[in-house]
Amino acid sequence: MSKRSRRSCCRRFPWPVFIVIAVVMAVHDWDDDRPSRRRTVKVEHDLPASAPVAPPGGETAASASTNVPANALANAPAAGLDREPFGEPSLMRNLYLVVDASASMGGEPGRHCLADRPFPTKMAAGQAALRTFVEQLPDDVNLGLYVFDRDVPRQLLALGEADHAAWRAAVDGIEAGGRAHLEKAIRFAVDRLVEQRRRQAGYGEFRLLLLTDETSHDLRDAAAYAARRGIPVYAVGLCTGAAHPMADRVYSYRSAERFADLLLELEASLTPPPPFEPAG
């Protein structure tokens, strides 16, 4: 090829384009070796890594112990409760009492009911037992109180440190009357315990104590609501008998036929479960 032909060929070839392509390819290969600059989204889970999840059946021996991280939210929490952030870990025990003060509690105990100590009404016996119970309460227990009397279900004391004077005033002011609102009361108490469990980052103990003389309710839906959220229900019946419909629904059920039994069953709601020993 002559010199003139070579110069003509060089002028026709797009050298600037070739140089730009080469530079782009080199930059691309160098960028592949660097860490990715893609924007990442941090996913924050509701449960802390150290908090085990309780089985749907409620509190187990391991999760109820104050030495073991308690059952953080067991399953789907009540609407809106999952939006509250976790607080600081705490081993405080939490007991929320639901007291039946319907019209039947205003009746006489009966000849064989609470015979070891006479009371004019079952409500009077319940009030006396609750006052004694709180006076003996340890300092590491938060307490809440929900009552339905005169057909007005309401929270008398929010879940928190036990104020003995406020507790006595609240209990003394209960007047039996109206219908039993067990389902609504249990659901309300469960929600308050779930909220408190989140404030304690899943640590501690969380129990619901029900005092009632109701015999016609098996509490199927309310018991399932509590179980799904890992809240054990301790039910104490005033002379309701062993064959109560809710005996198979709640975590613990006892019938108090004597006043001494009533005191013992209230105290048992705070008794630590036996040590957990894994099989094998």
Image: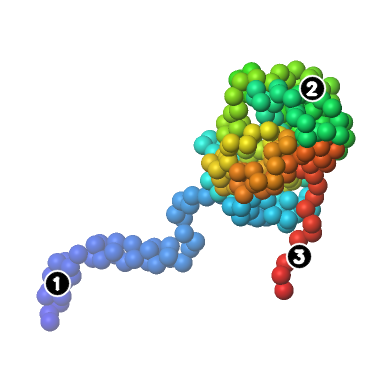
Separation of marks 3 and 2 at Cα, in angstroms: 46 Å
Mark in the foreground, 3 or 2: 2
Which residue does the numbered mark 2 point to in the structure image? 120
| Residue 86 appears in the rendering | no
Mark in the foreground, 1 or 2: 2
Residue 93 picture quarter: top right
- Left or right: residue 48 compared with residue 34: right
Separation of marks 1 and 2 at Cα, in angstroms: 119 Å
Q: Position of residue 57 (x, y in %)?
A: 61, 52
The mark that comes first in sequence, 1 or 2, is 1
Q: Is residue 247 above or below residue 277?
A: above
- Left or right: residue 171 compared with residue 152: right
Separation of marks 3 and 1 at Cα, in angstroms: 89 Å
Which residue does the numbered mark 3 point to in the structure image? 277
Q: Which mark is residue 9?
A: 1
Q: Position of residue 1 (x, y in %)?
A: 12, 82
Mark in the foreground, 3 or 1: 3
**Mark 3 residue type:** Glu
The mark that comes first in sequence, 3 or 1, is 1
- Toward the viewer: 123 or 137? 123
**Pointer 3 local density, CA inside 10 Å: few below 14, some 14–19, many at least 20:** few
Q: Position of residue 161 (x, y in %)?
A: 79, 31
- Toward the viewer: 159 or 124? 124
Task: Describe the element under mark 3 as helix, strand or loop.
Answer: loop
Q: Residue at x 12, y 80 (%)?
A: 2
**Pointer 1 local density, CA inside 10 Å: few below 14, some 14–19, many at least 20:** few
The mark that comes first in sequence, 3 or 2, is 2
